[in-house]
Amino acid sequence: MPFDTATSYRPGARFGPFAIRSGSRRQFAASNYALEWMMNPYNRAEVIDCGDVPVSPYDNALAVDQMETAYTTLLARPVNGSASARTAKLALDGVEHPRILTLGGDHTIVLPILRSLHQVYGPISVIHFDAHIDTWPSLGGITEQSKVTHGTFFTLAFEEGLMSNTSIHAGIRNKLHGPELIEHDEEVGFELIMADDIDDLGTDEIVKHIRQRIGDSPVYLSFDIDTIDPGQAPATGTPEPAGWTGRETKRILRGLAGLNFVGADIVEVAPAYDNAGDITGILAAGLANDFLALFVTDEPPKRQVKRRQTPADEL
């Protein structure tokens, strides 16, 4: 979804889908066995690239409607492949629906996505990886459409009844106007895991907390690339220092396997701010591959690390 006209700082995420696809050039379905996952997601499901959703760069209201229409149309398509059937028991119609991985685009794209998912599943939980809470009050401005931004969409989704009250943030480290915004965030339905919490809790405890929060509810995974420290992912519109590393984040993601994921996205990749090595696009493509693995696995991988014998062991 190449949309970025609701950003508050640096634009350019409309080119994110291109950058992520470009970063995936070394990822092939036939040679995608991931050692950390101990499987190849392409062997368990049919994966189709549906291309870019045509969105208006001039009219945000029209663009949001176009994105919702496209997502709703894709959700109605029949399911193929051998992925474990998990969504049928969650859907209001009792039918298995496609699980869509969306490449953004600024974070506003989640509002039309949640509207579409609500038609199929009712209110759902959200696991939100981000440096920012994105639950700013929708105070509006000159026009009604000015309420819809990449920082207010969760508040709007809450006001529309699209989410349950069992959602959670992970990786947060942005500055706020004051503590009242955290109170508002809790009202919207989120719990908070700060970026610094990884130092005190470690990845395993963060995984445990997320899983307990989400439970068995249908859950949507929304991932802003600024979760990652800008030293590893500089190409984003609102970078924040002191983020998680790619390795830490990928380990947390693996620990979430088996939750009832009904969709996912990766957003806010703005390649104009990347370095010559395109490291943000490459990292985002790797994370997208992890999301596919989350769709088709029933539990976190249990990799056994064999201890190597040392000369001291022989003495």
Image (spheres, rainbow, N blue to C red):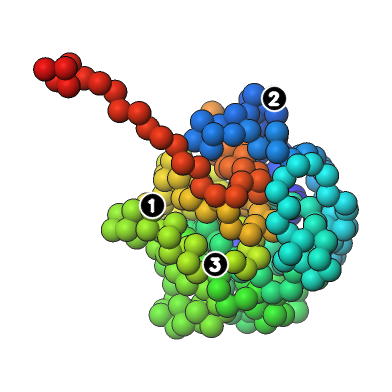
Q: CA distance from mark 1 to mark 3?
A: 17 Å
Image point 79% across, 53% down: which residue? 98
Spot occupied by residue 158 in the image (x, y as percentages of width and height): 65, 78
Q: Is residue 262 visible?
A: yes
The circle on residue 297 is: none
Q: Secondary structure at mark 3?
A: helix
Q: CA distance from mark 1 to mark 2?
A: 31 Å
The amino acid at mark 3 is Ile
Image point 52% across, 73% down: which residue? 190
Image point 54% across, 28% down: which residue? 277
The amino acid at mark 1 is Thr
Residue bearing the label numbered 1: 203
Image point 47% across, 72% down: which residue? 191
Horizontal side of 27 relative to 79 (left or right) equals: left
Q: Are marks 1 and 2 in contact (CB under 8 Å)?
A: no
- Residue count near mark 3 (Cα–Cα under 10 Å), binned few <14, some 14–19, many ≥20: many
Horizontal side of 196 relative to 164 (left or right) equals: left
Residue bearing the label numbered 2: 30
Residue bearing the label numbered 3: 214
Q: Are marks 1 and 3 in contact (CB under 8 Å)?
A: no
Q: Is residue 314 above or below residue 50?
A: above
Q: Secondary structure at mark 2?
A: helix
Spot occupied by residue 187 in the image (x, y as percentages of width and height): 53, 83
Q: Is residue 19 visible?
A: no
Camera-side residue of 62 and 22: 22
- Residue count near mark 1 (Cα–Cα under 10 Å), binned few <14, some 14–19, many ≥20: some
- Residue count near mark 2 (Cα–Cα under 10 Å), binned few <14, some 14–19, many ≥20: few
Q: Nearer the N terminus, badge 1 or badge 3?
A: 1
Spot occupied by residue 137 in the image (x, y as percentages of width and height): 58, 79
Q: Residue furthest left?
A: 315
The amino acid at mark 2 is Ala
Q: Nearer the N terminus, badge 2 or badge 3?
A: 2
